[in-house]
Amino acid sequence: MSDRVIITGGSGRLGRSVVDGFSAAGHQVISMDRTLPETPVSGVDYRAADLLDAVATAELFAEVGPDSVVSLAAIAVPFSAPEDVILKTNVGIAHNVTAAAVAAGARTVIIASSPSIMGYGSPVEWVPPRLPLDENVTPYPWHAYGLSKYAAEQVAAMFAQQTSRVKFISFRPCYVIAPEEWQGGPTQQGHTLVERLDRPELSAVALFNYVDARDVTDFLLTALASSDQVSNGAVFFVGAKDALARKPLSELIPEYFPELSHLAEGLTGDSPAFSVQKAKDVLGWEPKRSWRTELVE
Ligand SMILES: NC(=O)c1ccc[n+]([C@@H]2O[C@H](COP(=O)([O-])OP(=O)(O)OC[C@H]3O[C@@H](n4cnc5c(N)ncnc54)[C@H](O)[C@@H]3O)[C@@H](O)[C@H]2O)c1
């Protein structure tokens, strides 16, 4: 089925692939972002908008009348702005966009959260109950970015308590790799993927997680098409099937996180620290791309 889909943050690292994939899948795409992309996708309606302006956002959504909304716009990097700015921006956008989507008659709203809400990297000891992490493990955000994304999930859950006419889904994409990064383009942290693999301390900060932006797009298309399978307000991890590491995590985790050694024994071979089993069980989605097949070294 072809939907009229608003994608917020459509000019960003993840948004560009999502806009491209949704358009290629036959959806009518309206991208809303503060900035316009350098290379627009033909047929996509790009609108420059500040989604922190609740009134303007509501007016724009009412004018478009979306069937579905994918909410990606945010400050996407922890500590890249003052903590209060990250919190206000990300929670403000999540609320404005979700409220505008509901008021404009959307049937599905999918909101980007982040695995970083789990709490890894905290300066005080963080020991989860198990690895790999799954959606039943309680998040313990330790910075404003993590808190803002946890709050974004709660925004979706709150609206799910207000109406059953709309399906709300949150997803936690792992470290997003845009297609050009496989050829040596800079990743979100500035270094290349080869550097990230050769220097495990770079990838350890995110527990060696990653996902190809096109796999995230496939997840979003699947979630949209099968939203009736999802309980309202549900949350999904969206990651690759393997870890972004040349050695097994059963070796790397004890080296970089000694306090997690007892949890890492099962992470042999190429096993990641995040489970995507729920997305497979509920939606039938599985990631297709791995650094082992995509990376041009
Ligand atoms: N990149 C990752 O590794 C990663 C991992 C986990 C979660 N996420 C989440 O996925 C989403 C997309 O991430 P990304 O890497 O593409 O980020 P990005 O920074 O590349 O893109 C975010 C986009 O949001 C837009 N934006 C910011 N504030 C805005 C506002 N007030 N009004 C309108 N547009 C605004 C920016 O202009 C930008 O184009 C974010 O919500 C991010 O938190 C990303």
Image (cartoon, rainbow, N blue to C red):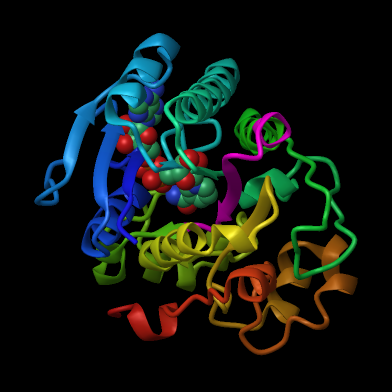
Left or right, residue 100 beside residue 84: left
Residue at horizontal 46 percent and vertical 62 percent from the top = 225
The number of numbered badges drawn on the structure is 0
Q: Quadrant of residue 71?
A: top left
- Residue 280 lies in the magenta stretch: no
- 215 to 76, vertically: above or below: below
Q: Which quadrant holds the C terminus? A: bottom left
Residue closest to the eye, 55 or 73: 55
Magenta region: which residues? 159-175
* Residue 184 appears in view: yes
Instruction: Find residue 168 and report its horizontal and vertical position in percent.
Output: 59, 44
Residue at horizontal 68 percent and vertical 48 percent from the top = 232
Q: Residue furthest front?
A: 165
Query: Which quadrant of the frame does ligand 1 lie within?
Result: top left
Instruction: Find residue 9 and report its horizontal and vertical position in percent.
Output: 35, 38
Residue closest to the eye, 81 or 211: 211
Residue at horizontal 57 percent and vertical 76 percent from the top = 284
- 85 to 68, vertically: above or below: above
Instruction: Find residue 135 and report its horizontal and vertical position in percent.
Output: 75, 58
Instruction: Find residue 271 and report its horizontal and vertical position in percent.
Output: 66, 81
- 201 to 281, vertically: above or below: above
Residue closest to the eye, 113 or 204: 113
- 119 to 222, vertically: above or below: above
Q: Quadrant of residue 67?
A: top left
Left or right, residue 175 beside residue 35: right
Q: Which quadrant holds the N terminus? A: bottom left
- Residue 160 lies in the magenta stretch: yes
Residue at horizontal 44 percent and vertical 80 percent from the top = 288
* Residue 36 appears in view: no
Q: Quadrant of residue 154?
A: top right
